[in-house]
């Protein structure tokens, strides 16, 4: 019988050894994928026991921190946003249910301390065994709360956005989306419903949408910067190329009129003999219409692509909150295979199904400011571990050359003229700031309602700041009268905050 | 018991201590009750040793009493009035406020019966004549009936596994084992099609993620708990066992699922050590079977040891998704009175056998 006994004992031991193997599988190989599952209540609760890292503004203002409480023997940290409605679309939120958006989502691993390298993994293991709370890393953003707050005040609840960048580095100083909401409402009873009701004039989009990166607005005349880039960079035109403006341009046998004069809405502006430079200065549609016909939709769209249209601008936000700019056909991004299907004249002055995000237009201005090279925008300046050591420090990067230095310099000149004697002359930018800009007043389908745009940078000779402003669907709202004053306030604030 | 195996009792004590510690961590009230049951268990253990210290082989004479007792205990939860259904399986008996899982004691009774019966019939059975397959078929039918009537795949699997192992030890016929396993698979498949509860268990085993909010909830949360422990565990007392509202993250955490609580807090290091302890216990058990001189003692020791190992496999294998999950207790560690008493009886049996075997060796 002993032979059988040995067999059975071996079987019994093998069965138990299988259990060690299975447990090893779940605790090592499968661990990460199980931890990420949505229905995992253990990691959900575990999230709450982590002292999530703070999110700080560039000046140290606390944008997100935690409130500690004890419940049923668990020390629980819940998120709090001391600045309430300052930048919820950018910072996002992290709920006790495990939902995250914005930077709270993209930086989750850093904030929860899950970005393990060997040294902090060991420290965390020791912390866990010692019963100490696991602390996440603090994140320091590039945002300047004073500028951000001013932008929100200026937008005053209207549908729109303000983006302010460092012209050289691409650091985002302000990314304001309006209407905004109080991020602390998210976890309150019925708070989410309340937020969904905040609509402003944005139509379907709620206050949750980051209008700066998600909002798609007809760019109107600000897009002339892209058309002019194509015209100059291909060498087909120079700033002094002559045009005759009869007040309209003829396309497909029909007259496409210039926009109406701000002082007499019934008449159309007519400028006669002008140069390309004057065409941009006074934002003459017929001039750009003719440029568009001459260089074609393909050339304009190719330059748009080089500026970053048709792809998501690379920035540290969740991809689903960043929309690419470009032509949209029936709600879908559309790059035509047959360029005859695109009206080059209207495209040239930023109509014709062209939609752009404020961030994208800010990047166009930043590229021109930066001599034709596009800086990579970023929101995260630094990530600091609980022990004070730096985990990540962002080094500014560029996204490559878009136009020749000469083209950028010519556009810079032309944009200065816009502010000095063109469509933004009446705004009253202080000459000392040397602002270079471009207005945009885009038709949005309903008559007399416009998207009011202004993109600019300053000082023109050594650009420091880039600002893009859009206020959507304003009755008789012109870029020069509605958005340029906002840009002016922002620029003044930015220059004042510098020593 | 001067010559009894010196390792078994300390190992049982260690396992019991690990169990009580974790049960205390999960809920001090249960730990106190478990403590009481341990006292009762130790008393039963002592009484058994005292009662059978001269020669436990008297039990052989009452084999049919044990056989009938085993069957009665197994079917007791079906009795109207006292039987109770928990989590879809009828395993419990309650009289007044006292809850009891009679199957745990039924297991011991079944092993005693099988040891005695197989010792007597092994030569006949080993010839493998067709008419001698009768008892095998009877027990197969019994297991299927238990499975069908109580919806309890775990117990059926456990009893049947013990039976097959002991049959093989007694007869040395692989054919029996092959046929028995085949019959079990066919039978349990048929039963699983017929009873929704057993079928659900199999479906969940195959793809728990499909039932994450319903029947797969418990096993998935348990796997999450195990995974959360990782290599080193969270440390005793620091694991996540309750939600903010105070409910256990995994239902039945201190009984059937105590392994997932231990795996989270002690980590792979801890539970691997725990399983090695079980393996050491099993090794000692089989050593006793090898040193015992008579067939009854050998079969009894082997049955008890294999039952102990196989029960561990069925529950931990269920929790780690090696086999479909069935609710039985983890020997010595899980919370539960009947389980504690049964396990102390099991150790008592092994000690008695080892004492006699060693005495004979020393005398010879």
Image (tube, rainbow, N blue to C red):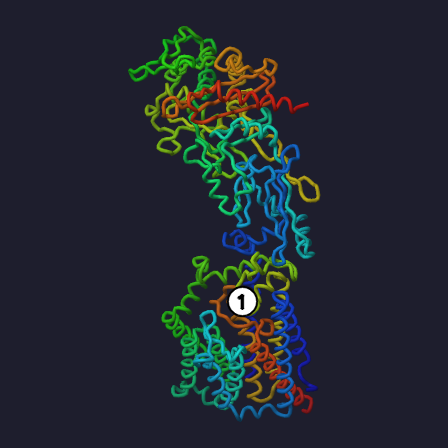
Identity of the residue drawn at 55% across and 14% down: A428
Q: Is residue A152 above or below residue B197?
A: above
User: Can residue B253 be seen at all in this image of the molecule?
Assistant: yes
Placement of A376 over or under B316, stated as above or below: above
Q: Residue furthest left?
A: A253
Provide residue A264's location: percent of width, then percent of height.
40, 12
Q: Is residue A13 above or below residue A152?
A: below
Q: Secondary structure at mark 1?
A: loop
Based on the displayed image, in which of its 4 quarters is residue B27 positioned? bottom right
Question: Residue A149, percent across and down?
Answer: 58, 30
- Which residue is at a point 54% across and 22% down the rendered structure image? A487
Left/right placement of residue A268 relative to residue A96 reads left
Label 1: few (<14), some (14–19) or many (≥20) C-alpha neighbours in 10 Å: some
Left or right of A88 in this view: A132: right
Residue A110, how many percent across, how many down?
61, 44
Chain under label 1? B
Residue at figure coordinates x 53%, y 31% from the top left: A176
Residue at image mark 1: B252
Q: Which residue occupies the foreground of this view, B197 or A309?
A: B197
| Residue A310 visible in the picture | no
Query: How many numbered discs, if any?
Result: 1
A230 to the left or right of B357: left
Residue sitting farthest toward the top: A273
A200 or B63: nearer the eye? A200
User: Where the N terminus of chain B falls, by quadrant?
Assistant: bottom right
A265 over B273 or under it: above or below? above
């Amino acid at each position: 019988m002993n032979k059988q006994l040995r067999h059975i004992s071996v079987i019994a031991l093998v069965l138990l050894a299988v259990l060690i193997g299975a447990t090893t599988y779940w605790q090592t190989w499968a661990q990460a994928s199980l931890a990420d599952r949505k229905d995992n209540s253990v990691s959900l609760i575990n999230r709450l026991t982590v002292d999530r890292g703070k999110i700080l503004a560039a000046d140290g203002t606390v944008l997100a921190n935690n409130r500690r409480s004890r419940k049923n023997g668990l020390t629980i940290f819940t998120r709090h946003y001391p600045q309430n409605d300052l930048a919820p679309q950018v910072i996002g939120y992290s709920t006790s249910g495990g939902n995250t958006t914005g930077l709270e989502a993209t930086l989750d691993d850093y904030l929860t301390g899950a970005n393990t390298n060997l040294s902090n993994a060991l420290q965390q293991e020791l912390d866990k065994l010692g019963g100490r709370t696991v602390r996440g890393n603090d994140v320091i953003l590039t945002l300047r709360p004073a500028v951000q707050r001013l932008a929100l005040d200026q937008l005053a609840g209207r549908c729109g956005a303000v983006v302010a960048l460092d012209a050289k580095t691409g650091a985002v100083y302000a990314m304001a989306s309006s209407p905004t909401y109080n991020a602390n409402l998210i976890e309150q009873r019925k708070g989410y419903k309340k937020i969904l009701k905040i609509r402003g004039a944005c139509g379907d989009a709620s206050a949750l949408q980051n209008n700066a990166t998600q909002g798609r607005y007809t760019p109107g005349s600000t897009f002339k910067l892209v058309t002019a880039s194509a015209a100059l960079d291909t060498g087909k035109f120079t700033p002094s190329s002559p045009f005759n403006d009869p007040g309209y341009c003829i396309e497909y046998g029909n007259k496409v009129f210039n926009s109406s004069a701000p002082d007499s809405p019934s008449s159309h502006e007519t400028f006669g003999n002008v140069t390309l430079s004057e065409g941009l200065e006074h934002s003459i549609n017929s001039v750009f219409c003719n440029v568009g016909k001459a260089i074609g939709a393909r050339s304009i769209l190719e330059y748009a692509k080089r500026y970053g249209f048709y792809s998501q601008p690379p920035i540290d936000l969740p991809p689903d909150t960043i929309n690419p700019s470009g032509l949209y056909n029936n709600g879908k991004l559309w790059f035509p295979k047959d360029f005859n299907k695109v009206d080059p004249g209207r495209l040239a002055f930023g109509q014709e199904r062209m939609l752009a995000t404020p961030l994208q237009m800010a990047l166009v201005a930043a590229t021109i400011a930066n001599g034709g090279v596009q800086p990579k925008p970023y929101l995260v300046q630094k990530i600091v571990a609980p022990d004070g050591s730096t985990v990540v420090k962002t080094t500014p990067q560029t996204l490559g050359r878009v136009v020749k230095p000469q083209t950028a310099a010519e556009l810079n000149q032309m944009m200065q003229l816009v502010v000095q004697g063109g469509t933004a002359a009446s705004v009253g930018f202080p000459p000392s700031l040397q602002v270079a800009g471009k207005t945009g007043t885009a038709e949005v389908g309903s008559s007399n309602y416009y998207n009011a745009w202004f993109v600019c940078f300053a000082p023109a000779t050594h650009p420091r700041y880039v600002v893009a402003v859009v206020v959507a669907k304003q009755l008789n709202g012109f870029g020069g009268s509605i958005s340029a004053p906002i840009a002016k306030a922002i620029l003044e604030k930015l220059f004042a905050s510098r020593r | 018991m001067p010559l009894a195996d010196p390792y078994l009792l300390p190992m049982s004590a260690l396992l019991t201590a690990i169990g009580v510690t974790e049960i205390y961590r999960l809920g001090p009230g249960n730990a106190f009750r478990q403590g009481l049951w341990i006292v009762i268990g130790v008393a039963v253990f002592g009484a058994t040793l005292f009662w059978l210290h001269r020669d436990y082989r008297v039990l052989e004479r009452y084999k049919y009493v044990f056989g009938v007792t085993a069957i009665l205990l197994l079917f007791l939860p079906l009795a109207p009035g006292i039987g109770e259904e928990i989590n879809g399986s009828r395993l419990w008996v309650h009289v007044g406020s006292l809850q009891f899982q009679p199957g745990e004691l039924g297991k011991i009774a079944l092993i005693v019966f099988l040891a005695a019966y197989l010792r007597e019939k092994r030569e006949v059975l080993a010839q493998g004549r067709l008419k001698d397959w009768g008892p095998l078929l009877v027990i197969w039918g019994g297991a299927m009936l238990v499975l069908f009537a109580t919806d309890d795949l775990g117990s059926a699997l456990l009893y049947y596994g013990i039976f097959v192992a002991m049959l093989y030890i007694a007869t040395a016929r692989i054919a029996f084992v092959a046929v028995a396993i085949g019959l079990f698979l066919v039978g349990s498949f048929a039963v699983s099609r017929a009873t929704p509860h057993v079928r659900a268990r199999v479906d969940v085993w195959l793809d728990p993620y499909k039932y994450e909010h319903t029947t797969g909830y418990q096993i998935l949360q348990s796997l999450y708990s195990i995974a959360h422990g990782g290599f080193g565990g969270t440390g005793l007392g620091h694991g996540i066992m309750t939600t903010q509202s105070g409910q256990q993250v995994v239902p039945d955490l201190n009984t059937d699922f105590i392994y997932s609580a231990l795996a989270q807090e002690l980590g792979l290091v801890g539970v691997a050590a725990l399983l090695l302890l079980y393996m050491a216990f099993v090794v000692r058990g089989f050593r006793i079977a090898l040193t015992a001189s008579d067939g009854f003692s050998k079969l009894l020791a082997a049955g008890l040891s294999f039952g102990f190992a196989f029960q561990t496999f069925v529950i931990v294998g269920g929790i780690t998704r090696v086999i479909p999950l069935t609710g039985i207790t983890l020997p010595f560690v899980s919370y539960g009175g009947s389980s504690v008493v049964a396990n102390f009886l099991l150790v008592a049996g092994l000690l008695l056998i080892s004492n006699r075997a060693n005495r004979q060796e020393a005398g010879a």
